[in-house]
């Protein structure tokens, strides 16, 4: 091999080493987005034992998280070039975790309420979820056409949600039971006949009807007697620490490229692959 060929080969080898090192450094330096969620709120998020369907391993756990929120978190991270870390937390711990900076954001089916906006910032909505009612198919409320037809029902919903705080009080003479700590617990209460109805959002209701074939979904949205809710009650957003405009703008930049059809397609996929055992 002559000198010029050796020199060229050496340059190519050195260049390849530099590129490999650069790629390694880039991968190590990529920002990790720490995203909190319950990992127990199908179809938004749930826990499963494997990485089936592209599930993401939960931080400090051998289990994996999947669902609409995980799919959205993965899409955001892919678009922004971030690594993704899923942190599993109880519902009531989500907002405090954002406020303290323990996590970067919460993607967990949170409504963009004015109360929450007092302590955290929100991105633009990443889903719009109408309010529905679930009851047993053989319940006397199964043929209800509006909120007035639910009068006297024994009911419950999830703790610290607009379903429990805003919607249940609209039912005349309702027997409102203590709030349930999680969406699965709410559904178990209905299945176990501890209540006549639960109020939740449409994706949760659709997923519940797959898990519990004896449930009936009642949607009064287009009736003359719907639940009175505001846009903030049905707009689902990603919460971030107050003043974190850099991350907020980055995420909004990803969301603005998506359409309503993109959201629905993603949600339908989540509902189709949700594990039925989560609601048992």
Image: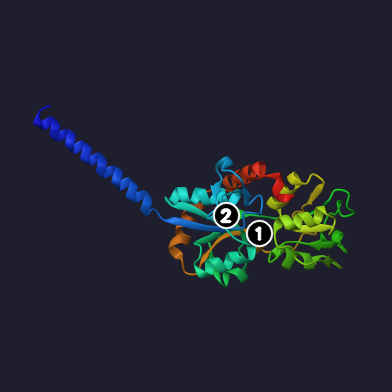
Q: Residue at x 78, y 65 (%)?
A: 168
Q: Residue furthest top?
A: 1
Real-space Cα distance between discs 1 and 2? Answer: 11 Å
Q: Residue furthest left?
A: 3
Seen from the viewer's position, the closer of residues 62 and 263 is: 62
Which residue shows up at 47% across the image and 51% down it? Answer: 77
Q: What secondary structure is marked by label 2?
A: loop
What number is the disc on residue 31? none
View extreme (bottom): residue: 118
Q: In x, y percent, where is residue 194?
A: 84, 59
- For disc 2, the neighbor class at 10 Å (few under 14, some 14 to 19, many from 20) is many
Q: Which residue is mark 2?
A: 126
Q: Which mark is residue 234?
A: 1
Q: Do we see residue 140 in this rendering?
A: yes
Residue at horizontal 51 percent and vertical 49 percent from the top = 74
Specify the quadrant that holds the N terminus: top left
Asked whether, in this view, residue 148 is left or right of residue 44, the answer is right
Question: Is the Cβ of the residue at disc 1 closer than 8 Å to that at disc 2?
Answer: no
Compared across the picture, whether 236 is left or right of 14 comes to right
């Amino acid at each position: 091999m002559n000198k010029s060929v050796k020199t060229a080969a050496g340059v190519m080898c050195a260049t390849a080493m530099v590129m490999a090192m650069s790629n390694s450094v880039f991968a190590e330096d990529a920002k990790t987005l720490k995203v909190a969620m319950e990992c127990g709120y199908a179809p938004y998020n749930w826990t499963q034992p494997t990485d089936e369907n592209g599930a993401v391993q939960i931080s400090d756990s051998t289990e994996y998280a999947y669902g609409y929120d995980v799919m959205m978190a993965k899409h955001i991270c892919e678009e922004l070039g971030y690594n993704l870390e899923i942190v599993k937390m109880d519902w009531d711990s989500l907002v405090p975790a954002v406020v303290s900076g323990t996590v970067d954001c919460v993607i967990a089916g949170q409504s963009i309420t004015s109360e929450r906006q007092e302590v955290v910032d929100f991105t633009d909505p990443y889903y719009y979820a109408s309010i529905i009612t679930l009851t047993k198919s053989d319940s006397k409320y199964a043929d209800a056409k509006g909120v007035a037809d639910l009068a006297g029902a024994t009911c419950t919903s999830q703790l610290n949600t607009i379903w429990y705080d805003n919607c249940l009080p609209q039912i005349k003479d309702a027997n409102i039971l203590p709030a349930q700590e999680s969406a699965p617990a709410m559904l178990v209460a209905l299945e176990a006949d501890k209540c006549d109805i639960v109020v939740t959002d449409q994706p949760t209701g659709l997923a519940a009807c797959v898990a519990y074939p004896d449930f009936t979904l009642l949607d009064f949205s287009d009736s003359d007697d719907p639940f009175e809710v505001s846009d903030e009650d049905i707009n689902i957003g990603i919460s971030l620490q107050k003043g974190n405009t850099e991350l907020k703008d980055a995420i909004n930049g990803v969301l603005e490229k998506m359409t309503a059809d993109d959201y629905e397609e993603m949600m339908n996929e989540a509902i189709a692959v949700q594990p039925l055992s989560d609601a048992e």
